[in-house]
Image (cartoon, helix red, strand yellow):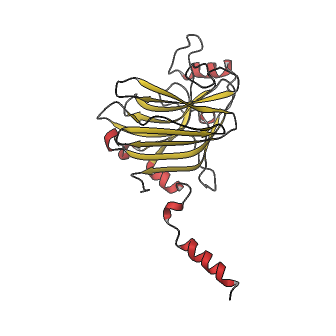
Amino acid sequence: MRAALPAALALLAAMTLPAAAQTFTPQATLEKLFTLEGNTPYPSPYAGTLNFSALTSKYDSGHGHGYRNELKVADKLRLSAAQTHEHFAARVTPTLPAGAKTIVAQYHVEGLDTILKVYVQDTADKQGLDGKAGNGVFDILVRILGTDGKEVTTALGTVRSGEGFDLDIAFHAGEALVTARTASGEIKTQRTRIKGDDRKIYFKFGDYLQALDPDTGKHTIEPAKWDQYYRQNHIDGSQISFSHTIFERNGVQP
């Protein structure tokens, strides 16, 4: 009887664990909340990990600056910034060639405007902790549109291809807080209030692989120019993996 007691207690504890102890958001919940751009990111079986590849999907939204493979909050579920209460967290692992730049998460306003973007980039940028182009060190940068209409940039750390970092994005009633944890430690943005706007907003995450016109160095919506840019910069593959993926609205899952 004594030998059976610990097992019985363990079973009872497991049966009474709260739902909040779950370590990732179920696929069925994500599929209710998000629509897909590009190839499905869900492996089988799904256990909280999603794999996105813009270069495999080659999804063209018609107004982007490179191919993408993303999940975005469905049209019917979008709210204004003031009404939005959401939390996203995941272990993000980019597998990218030197010189690549991608957006792994963003808040978009209906239309073409963005209010928050998280970049993983190996491009020249004085606001990064590394800031050098093509050396295999990827800066993690977040840009948030402040109340004055100017983007506030925060450097959140660096990783190399194949290394993961923990990303946490909290958005509550028009106020954003972004945290990244790398092998070097944790960095948080200031709690930032975004510029007021009555339009609906929506969260997206995945692999939005940036490209420029190789002749002018400017943004372009032409896929043929993107292909040329990727070839010239030896960007021949991309994968962004999100593990232990959690997305919550109003603190609970629907």
- Which residue ends up furthest to the top in the rendered image? 216
Residue 63 in sight: no
Is 43 on the left-hand or right-hand side of 65? Answer: right
Q: Quadrant of residue 100?
A: top right
Instruction: Report the residue that reaches farthest toward the bottom.
Output: 1
Residue 167, given in percent of the width and then of the height, sits at 55, 41
Residue located 48% across and 55% down the image: 29
Is residue 35 in view?
Answer: yes
The answer to which of 28 and 96 lies nearer the viewer is 96
Q: Position of residue 90 (x, y in %)?
A: 56, 46
What residue sits 38% from the left and 38% below the top? 175
Residue 248 higher or lower than 10, as above or below:
above
State the residue at coordinates (53%, 46%): 89
**Near-viewer residue (158 or 241):** 158
Count of picture labels: 0
In this rendering, position of residue 132 left or right of residue 175: right
The residue at 34%/39% (across/down) is: 81
Percent position of residue 2, x then y: 68, 86
Q: Quadrant of the C terminus?
A: bottom left
Q: For residue 215, what is the image quadrant?
A: top right
Residue 171 spot, x, y in % from top left? 41, 42
Q: Is residue 44 above or below residue 240?
A: below
